[in-house]
Amino acid sequence: MDENLGSPGAVDTAAVELAGCSVADLLVASGWSTGRQVAVDDVVELLAAEGHRFSPRSRALLVSLAGLTLWPDGDLGAADARSGPHPDPVVIDPVGSGSGELDRIRLAEASLGVELAPLGEVGLDLLATDPTGRLVRIGVVEVGVLGDDLCSSLCQLLRPDPDRPTRWVRLT
C-alpha cells in the first residue's frame, strides 16, 4: 500500500471537525459518531489501481464517513435548485462514485485546479473531496465547490443556504 495514503492523526482531525460542525446532528442521525473508523484500505487500493489519488485528508474522511447515507434536512424548497424541493440522499460510497469515473474526476480537477478523490454520490452527481477537505459536486457538464472547508461544505450539502449558492463552473 502507498504509505502517503493517510495517517491516524488525520482521522482524529476529521472527527473533531465533524463533531463541531453545525450539521453534526444529521451526521449522528445517519450513524456517524466521534471516533468512527471504517477500514478503507482495500477500497483505497482498488481505486488507486484505477488511477485515483487520495490525500491524507481525503482518506481520513473516508475512514470517518464511508458507508453512510446522509439525508439533507427536511423540505428545502428553492434552497437547492439542483436537487429540487426533495433533495437526493448523499451516499458515501467511494467505489460507486469513483470506479469507472476517473475521466470525469480528472475533468473536474482540471476545471478547479485541484486534486480530487471520490467520496460518494448525490443523485446523478459525484461527490469528491480535495486535499483540504472541501467537498465538490461533479455533474455531467459542470462542477461546484460546496464550501470553503469541510464544515461549510457539509452545511451547503445538507442544509443549503439560498444566500450562499454553490458556484458552478463548466467542466473543461
Image (cartoon, helix red, strand yellow):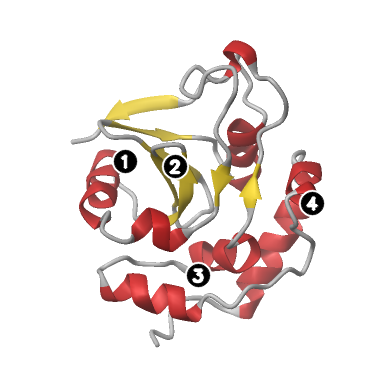
On the image, numbered disc 1 is attached to which residue?
A: 112
Circle 2: is it few (<14), some (14-19), or many (20+) Cα within 10 Å? many
Cα separation, mark 2 vs mark 1, equals 10 Å
Which one is earlier in the sequence, the residue at label 4 or at label 2? 4
Element on which disc 3 rests: helix
Quarter-of-image position of residue 49: bottom left
Spatial CA distance of label 2 from label 3 is: 17 Å
Q: Amino acid at mark 3?
A: Pro
On the picture, is 164 further left or further right than 140? right
- Number of residues whose C-alpha sits closer than 10 Å to that of mark 3, classed few (under 14), some (14–19) or many (20 or more): many
| Quarter of the picture holding the N terminus | bottom left
Residues under numbered marks 1 and 4 in contact, where contact means CB atoms less than 8 Å apart: no
Which residue is denoted by mark 4 in the rendering? 28
Q: Amino acid at mark 1?
A: Leu
C-alpha separation, residue under disc 4 versus residue under disc 2: 22 Å
Q: Earlier in the sequence, mark 1 or mark 4?
A: 4
At x 79%, y 48%, the residue is: 29
Please give the name of the residue rendered at 55% of the width and 33% of the height, measured from the top-left corner: 88
> Along the horizontal axis of the image, is 15 left or right of 144?
right
Image label count: 4
Q: Residues within 10 Å of mark 4 (few under 14, many from 20)?
A: some
Residue position for label 3: 56
Depth check, front residue: 38 or 58: 38
Please name the amino acid that badge 4 sits on. Val
Mark found first going from the N terminus, 3 or 1: 3
Residue on which disc 2 sits: 136
Q: CA distance from mark 3 to mark 4?
A: 23 Å
In this rendering, the label closer to the viewer, 2 or 3: 2
